[in-house]
Image (cartoon, rainbow, N blue to C red):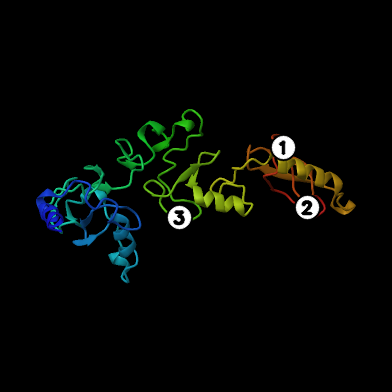
Amino acid sequence: MEQQHQQDSALTPLTKPKDFGKSDYGCEHYKRRCKILAPCCNQIFPCRHCHNEVTSNLSNPKDHHELVRQDVKQVVCLICNTEQQVAQVCSNCGVNMGEYFCDVCKFYDDTDKGQFHCEECGICRVGGRDNFFHCKKCGSCYSVSLRDNHLCVENSMKNFCPVCYEYLFDSIKGTTIMKCGHTMHMDCFHEMAGQNQYRCPICSKTVCEMSAYWRSLDEEIQATAMPEEYQNEVSILCNDCNNTSNVRYHILGHKCSHCNSYNTRRISTPDNQ
């Protein structure tokens, strides 16, 4: 017991090992051993997301605001409760307040997510620097598998998710690039696909593999004759290739005569209506 007491006594505030308390502190967003002092409202929060959640729910809309991460100057160590200037190592007890630390973003994280700072994005990303490249036209970091393999839309990530309306550029949720070049949260994309919604909510182009479904529509339409009074032509606009066609009216759908997509819309009524 005496030996154990001597060991505990040796861990004075100035001799804590750097990994002391690692992953034991933090919030629902990040594991870290400090809190941040928000200069915009002079209050202490576990992270900027916690700050934004609180301020977005204030009763007075004029008080709603978001924390600019680069503006943070002071943090509070959660091991020794010392307020100090932003740094990775606590100036009092010597622990790493975050195993990953970015002095530009004032960002701390004890969980290894392959974090890296992208100078062109101006913020930290996760997933490993070697696994991403920065697309200058889209204005964001994308997986290297998409290099020369995606449709560029200028500043596509600097927009809101078309499903949940969260700002995509600095969202902590995973995102995906659709074939049309627009972006949305991966979870929102899967939810949309699960509800048989195959069009981009922004441009209406097909974003899923639909060839098998198009073939089944071919068979259904061939097997289902329309009554004689509805056997007329209609004009359609294809959402996928943007061409117009004149096709036979059918209640099940209208096939583009240019790209064979059924992702079309009528721009005229049947001749007899």
Q: Mark 3 and mark 2 in contact? Answer it, CB < 8 Å.
A: no
Among numbered discs 3 and 2, the one appearing first in the sequence:
3
Q: Residue at x 85, y 49 (%)?
A: 224
What's the amino acid at mark 3? Answer: Tyr
State the count of labels.
Answer: 3
Q: Is residue 139 visible?
A: no
* Left or right side of 37 for 233: right
Residue that mark 2 sits on = 251
Q: Earlier in the sequence, mark 2 or mark 1?
A: 2
Q: CA distance from mark 2 to mark 1?
A: 17 Å
Inter-mark Cα distance, 3 to 2: 34 Å
Residue carrying label 1? 260
Question: Crowding near pointer 1: few (<14 within 10 Å), some, many (20+)?
Answer: some
Q: Amino acid at mark 1?
A: Asn
Spatial CA span between label 1 and label 3: 32 Å
Counting other residues with Cα less than 10 Å from the Cα at mark 2, is it few (<14), some (14-19), or many (20 or more)? few
* Depth order, front residue of 92/199: 92
The residue that disc 3 covers is: 165
Is any atom of residue 190 visible in this view? yes
